[in-house]
């Protein structure tokens, strides 16, 4: 299942009110906008929802979402409004058919076992799917939970070669890019993954011929600390991750994680904030091209943010979601809600960045409510 559409607001009628409108998503997505427009906030809106659904955090906000099951093309709409830890409203429809209608501590829930809506009285501070989960009776809850459990969010700028996260569970291997030395232990068991990582890293502009993991002792390091070592083609010595540039290590870590997730061969969403930060323009463009090429046709939905012009130029214009903020409101311009302007631009032969920087997408834009 993939996320197709987002509308969101929080703190309505308060000074810190914030709204994001009309974000349409496909299999590959590049979120762009000027600094302080709302790119990272949008990523957090999506990430926070996954944490609410998996009961990792409790926060407030109002989400209006549309999902699509890629196996059967069923469309799910999920609306959730949480204010001060109270579930004010929660609804689910499947292809327009009402499955859940709930306000605070009362509502109706469709039972696939009884083939009808049944009355429910959930606690005000809990999602219905948290207290009424049943794979047979309420299978639509499993769709949402499965999506949230297979969401992987990464911050490109938060990855540094001198910071290592030691995962304490198998699931934690994919929590952030700093777990890569431990993920590699698993990934390199497959010779095909090793070959793909080496090939991809060379394609991005970092020629290497081998990958190793070292557990050598480092002063004051925790027991079992592992580090990546690369054999660069023009060096006779190994390059330890502690001596890699931030850009080099970030690019390597991302390639490893993407290869590993592709090998898992399951539907999931991968979100990457500030892709290309720390890379020179040529490598930023190359890693973008590589990612998009590998994701297209896979089971991964990719959501990337950036304002790097070279990275933007490496993308198909139809992948763009262009964010613009006016005060407390962020609007999104994308192929689905500005189709005429996007298609007109495709005939001009200009760089994609020209479309973004010249605001050509705004003319004749449909009115927003």
Image (spheres, grey):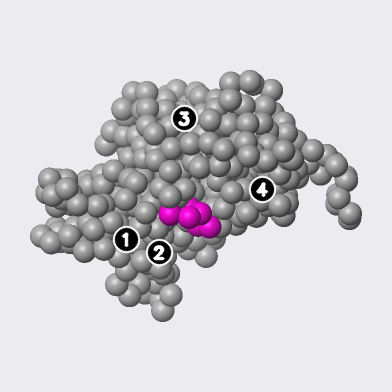
Residue at 43% across, 32% down: 294
Pick the quarter of the image with the N terminus: top left
The numbered mark, 2 or 1, whose residue comes first in the sequence reads 2
Residue 97 position in % (x across, y down): 29, 34
Q: Can residue 143 be seen in this view?
A: no
Residue 63 in the image: above or below residue 115: below
Instruction: Return the residue nearer the eye: 285 or 10.
Output: 285
Dot 4 alpha-carbon crowd within 10 angstroms: few under 14, some 14 to 19, many 20 or more: many
Which mark is drawn over residue 323? 1
Label 1, label 3: how far apart the Cα atoms are: 27 Å
- State the residue lying farthest toward the bottom: 15
- Image location (x, y in percent) of residue 241: 70, 47
State the residue at coordinates (22%, 47%): 335
Q: Is mark 1 on a helix, strand or loop?
A: strand
Tag shown at residue 178? 4
Q: Distance between the residues labelled 2 and 3?
A: 27 Å
Q: Is mark 3 on a helix, strand or loop?
A: loop
Q: Which mark is residue 267?
A: 3
- Is residue 308 in the magenta section? no
Q: Distance between the residues labelled 4 and 1?
A: 29 Å
């Amino acid at each position: 299942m993939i996320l197709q559409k987002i509308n969101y607001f929080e703190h309505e009628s308060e000074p810190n009110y914030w709204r994001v409108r009309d974000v349409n998503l496909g299999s590959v997505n590049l979120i762009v906008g000027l600094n302080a427009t709302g790119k990272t906030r949008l990523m957090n809106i999506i990430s926070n929802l996954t944490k609410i659904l998996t009961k990792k955090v409790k926060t407030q906000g109002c989400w209006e979402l549309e999902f699509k099951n890629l196996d059967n093309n069923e469309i799910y709409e999920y609306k959730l409004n949480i204010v001060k830890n109270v579930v004010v409203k929660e609804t689910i429809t499947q292809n327009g058919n009402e499955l859940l209608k709930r306000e605070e501590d009362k509502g109706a829930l469709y039972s696939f076992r009884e083939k009808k809506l049944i009355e429910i009285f959930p606690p005000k501070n809990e999602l219905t799917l948290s207290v009424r989960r049943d794979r047979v009776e309420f299978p639509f809850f499993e769709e949402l939970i499965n999506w949230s459990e297979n969401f992987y969010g990464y911050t490109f700028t938060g990855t540094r070669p001198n910071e290592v996260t030691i995962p304490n569970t198998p699931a934690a291997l994919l929590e952030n890019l700093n777990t890569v030395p431990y993920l590699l232990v698993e990934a390199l068991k497959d010779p095909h993954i090793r070959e793909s990582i080496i090939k991809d890293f060379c394609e991005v502009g970092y020629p290497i011929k081998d990958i190793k993991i070292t557990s050598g002792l480092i002063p004051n390091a925790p027991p079992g600390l592992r580090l990546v070592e690369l054999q660069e083609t023009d060096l006779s010595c190994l390059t330890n991750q502690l001596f890699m540039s931030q850009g080099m290590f970030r690019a390597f870590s991302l390639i490893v994680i993407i290869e590993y997730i592709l090998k898992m061969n399951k539907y999931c969403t991968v979100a990457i904030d500030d892709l290309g930060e720390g890379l020179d323009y040529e490598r930023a463009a190359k890693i973008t091209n590589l990612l998009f090429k590998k994701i297209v046709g896979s089971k991964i939905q990719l959501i990337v943010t950036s304002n790097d012009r070279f990275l933007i130029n490496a993308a198909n214009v139809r992948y763009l979601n262009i964010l613009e903020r006016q005060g407390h409101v962020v609007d999104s311009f994308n192929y689905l809600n500005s189709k005429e302007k996007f298609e007109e631009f495709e005939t001009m032969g200009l760089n994609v960045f020209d479309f973004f920087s010249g605001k050509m997408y705004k003319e004749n834009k449909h009115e927003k409510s």
